[in-house]
Amino acid sequence: MPFASEQMQSVVEQQLSKSDTIKLRNKHIGQACQLFYRSDPLKIVRGQGQYMFDEEGTRYLDCINNVAHVGHCHPEVVRAGALQMATISTNNRFLHDELVQCAKTLTSKMPSPLSVCFFVNSGSEANDLALRLARNYTKCQDVITLDHAYHGHLQSVMEISPYKFNQPGGEKKPDYVHVAPCPDIYGGQFTDNMYPNADLGALYAQPIADICERQRAKGQGVAAFIAESLQSCGGQILPPAGYFQRVYDAVRNAGGLCIADEVQVGFGRVGSHYWAFETQGVVPDIVCVAKPMGNGHPVGAVVTTPEIAQAFHATGVAYFNTYGGNPVSCAIANAVMRIIDQEGLQQNAHQLGDYLLRGCSQLKQEFECIGDVRGLGLFVGIELVRDREARVPDTKAAHWVVNRMKQLHKVLVSSDGPNDNVIKLKPPMCFNHENADEFLLAFRECLATLTQDQLQSRAAEAAAAALTNTTNGVIATAADTLANKTKMFERQDRLIKSV
């Protein structure tokens, strides 16, 4: 591995204790920047493959990190970035092979006519630029988004992120943003148990068609519909079959463009396809990519059609991004895409994802607290419930499991969804069968302990209730006896007085 000795020396020479790091963070880092495991945060000092290590050398299995797509500190990614950084790093106003090769490779993975790239530094920037492209092309302002969606931290994309603006203290949704139901067939507006024989794709697409119709009736039109191809923050949601086809038809009939946010789920994560939107048989007008593209390095892109790109150029306003498309970022992105192909990581996601889903489904048969298991490839959600029949979310249990997995088993998972009760798995793509078994074994122990604790708690509650009832019964009997004796004495007293 490049810089192996220097890396270890750097870790050894870390001068700050964990407590000092926490103190400095509390003093100098905005409190709105939240940590994982806030009551006992991890100080991660090194990563390798699917593992992360804290300052004491403890190894953690990383099931959270879809950013380190091909594995933490992959030697080929490190080498590509270091070599290019040592050669030249400048902006994309100069000709450079890494830039055009990156665009060529990226667009070769896309269906026609998606063939033109704009490079950025993050998913937030990518989604912001996608909105600009759509609004410029359609000359409309209104955007349709999905409930629980998150598309980034810039003002323009916070406006289309109910995951953020619906929180206490969130800014009010603008009138030009329209929110449609999240296509969650387990816990959403239309569920598979409420509508067992219905076309759920059609049911969830209808609200979007209605929004489009209202916009057309007002003569305002629609600029864009934007959605994650698989919603992550919404709780690892897989849309029902045919959903995006119907939605795209409705939006395009209203003159709008369709934007696929692949920031979380692109680059082979779903296993069966390179892009998650392909699982629904649709071709977006604009695709946004980022996080996994740089394996931890800030790089992203917007891919669109020549027609939309030309309309943007025709405004006469040049698009320039200082770091977007710089040689170092592009060299790293090129390395990531090579590694995905050379190491068969998409195929690994497909096979291992099926294995994980089977294992989790077996646990569902064993534990009533699992309400649903869903996913594609290495994008898996496990929904915890208090009542499987009523599908009542169990947020407390999810938080307990996340913490126990970290503290006892050294396995890092997270929870999300509108009720924060969905355990999320989106590990680096080098995740293997041994890692899957380690997760399943640890998760099973957590569920077994959770179930035992819940049974003991319910038994204690039942015993307390029985004791209360018994005590109340004894008190009531004693009161009745006393009352009867009082009445008897009163009758005797009256008899005595009468004599």
Image (cartoon, rainbow, N blue to C red):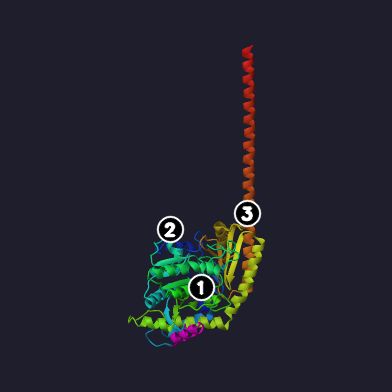
Disc 1 and disc 3: Cα gap in Å? 46 Å
Residue linked to disc 3:
453
Q: Which of marks 2 and 1 is nearer the N terminus?
A: 2
Residue linked to disc 2:
168
Q: Which of marks 1 and 3 is nearer the N terminus?
A: 1
Disc 2 and disc 3: Cα gap in Å? 33 Å
Task: Tell me if I can see residue 264 in this picture.
Answer: no
Disc 2 and disc 1: Cα gap in Å? 33 Å
Say which quadrant the C terminus sits in: top right
Looking at the image, which residue is at 62% across and 50% down?
A: 457
Looking at the image, which residue is at 61% across and 73% down?
A: 353
Residue 88, how many percent across, how many down? Answer: 41, 85
Judged from the image, the secondary structure of the residue bearing numbered disc 3 is helix
Q: Which amino acid does label 2 sit on?
A: Pro
For discs 1 and 3, the disc positioned in front in the rendered view: 1
Judged from the image, the secondary structure of the residue bearing numbered disc 2 is loop
Which quadrant would residue 48 be assigned to in this image? bottom right
Give the crowd class for mark 3: few <14, some 14-19, many >=20 residues within 10 Å: few
Residue 365, how many percent across, how many down? Answer: 66, 63
